[in-house]
Amino acid sequence: MHRRTFIVQSMWSLGALAALPLRYVQAATTGKHYYLDSAAGNDAHDGSSQAQAWRSLDRLNKATFGPGDQILFKRGGDYPGMFQPKGSGAVGAPVVVDAYGSGALPHLHADGRGPSTVRLQNVEYWTLRNLEISNQGPQPGPRRTGVHLFHQDFGIAHGILLQGLHIHDVNGVAIKQQGGGSAILVEASGKTRPTRYQGLTIADNTIERSQRDGILFLGAGNRTGGLASGVVVRGNRISEVPGDCILVKGCDGAQVEHNTVSRCGALPRGEAAAGIWPFDCDNTMVQYNEVSDHKAFADGQGYDSDFRCRNTVIQYNYSHDNIGGMALVCNDGRSGGDIGNTGTIVRFNVSINDALRKTDSASLRISGPVDGSQIYNNIIIIPEKPLAGAQVTVFKATSWKGVPNSIAIHDNIVVSPHSPGVEMQLATRTQMGENRIYASNDQAPAARADAQMLDRFKQHRPSLAQVNALVKACFAGGKPVANALELIAKVT
């Protein structure tokens, strides 16, 4: 590091420490270490060293932790039960839960005997990393979850980080109205004191085989007591989750990025879900994600901007093989008088082989009294549908106790074996302009898509990096470039 940079950063660090209350500065240097070893530990020990490690979660739950403390689970260990810690960290001195030693991640599992395996309740400044977590009971159970963040009448819950966790085999129930289930559940509520999160990060986790949902926010805040801020959901890998894979709710400025969702599986008849979406949020950024193979009975899109969302941006994402389409923008007109859905932007995304239902599906659907959405500079590639006679619809407006208004759809690229349908008749004040359609059955040579290229897209799926590079190359100054079709053919 350059000497001047080092001096400046060192001075800043010292200044930041000086600004903290004395109890926080002391905690950062005096935090204790607690060790758990499920094989050689003993709950009669004091837990202060590897040789004095505790054995069980029951013993751990009796302790109260403070700023700078570390709770270290031995790798390869097996820890049945529920982890429900007490105490909080502080600014610059979180309580850190991590693994030590070598081998497999330490495995914490409630086995259905508790609603969650890890429950952080009314605590703040906690970091959980490098743990394996499951909660599979003999039978599916409602609201079963792996990690539950639960804050009630707490005020602002600061500084929670979930990172590098492997959460799997959580058998909740498949039906939302019966309680559902999730790998990670985020819940803030306040009857006597407004409660919300500030500085919540869920990053680089692997989630597998969770019924019904993956990362589920029941509410990180609300519009009465304040929306959550500083929420980041980044770099998570989610598979075999049939419901809502990432749903953020009650946030302002949430960043949902670089996540991968795949092999979602099916939900029962009547159940609606989507890959990644905000609900009751402002200024959400959904970018650089990949969602594939969503098969929900209803909806089933890769991405969604839902009720009571303002200024959502869905950009640079990859959607493929999702039964309902690339994206949904919706609002229920029965909730009259609230903020509705306004200002959604869907741009710079690539869709391949989405909207797979035989009827009533579209690459992009806008439903209900949605206002001011902009849909532009997307690439939508539609190979021959697997079901004979299936409709090919690219943009579709539908009524939901009201209709879309002031929707702008322009400068998108659509590649299809047939001239696709555009069903925006129900919407009011729609602006359609200069969308470039390449169809293999078109008689104009300049607009004709190569049938062999589309056949290759029946099987071939480029990477997220490839489609991001493609969408950046195919538009200049907000307009499709002249050789866009040639560039699309090369990506195969």
Image (tube, helix red, strand yellow):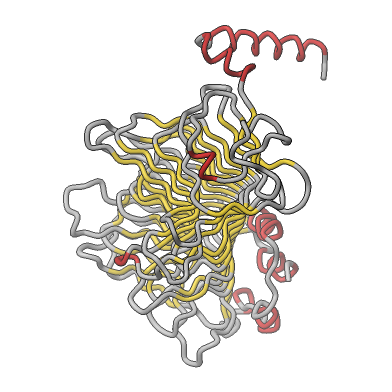
Question: Who is closer to the viewer here, 479 or 244?
Answer: 244
Q: Residue at x 30, y 69 (%)?
A: 398
Q: Is residue 301 left or right of residue 194?
A: right
Q: Position of residue 34 (x, y in %)?
A: 63, 33
Q: Residue at x 65, y 9 (%)?
A: 14
Question: Who is closer to the viewer here, 475 or 289?
Answer: 289
Which residue ends up furthest to the bottom in the rendered image?
388
Q: Residue at x 48, y 34 (%)?
A: 230
Question: Who is closer to the viewer here, 375 or 436?
Answer: 375
Q: Position of residue 408 (x, y in %)?
A: 39, 56
Mark yes or no: residue 243 visible.
yes
Mark yes or no: residue 302 visible.
no
Q: Position of residue 442 (x, y in %)?
A: 56, 82
Question: Who is closer to the viewer here, 300 or 119?
Answer: 119
Q: Which quarter of the picture shows residue 352?
A: bottom right
Q: Is residue 473 left or right of residue 447?
A: right
Asked if residue 1 is positioned above or below residue 255 in the image, the reply reads: above
Asked if residue 14 is positioned above or below residue 335 in the image, the reply reads: above
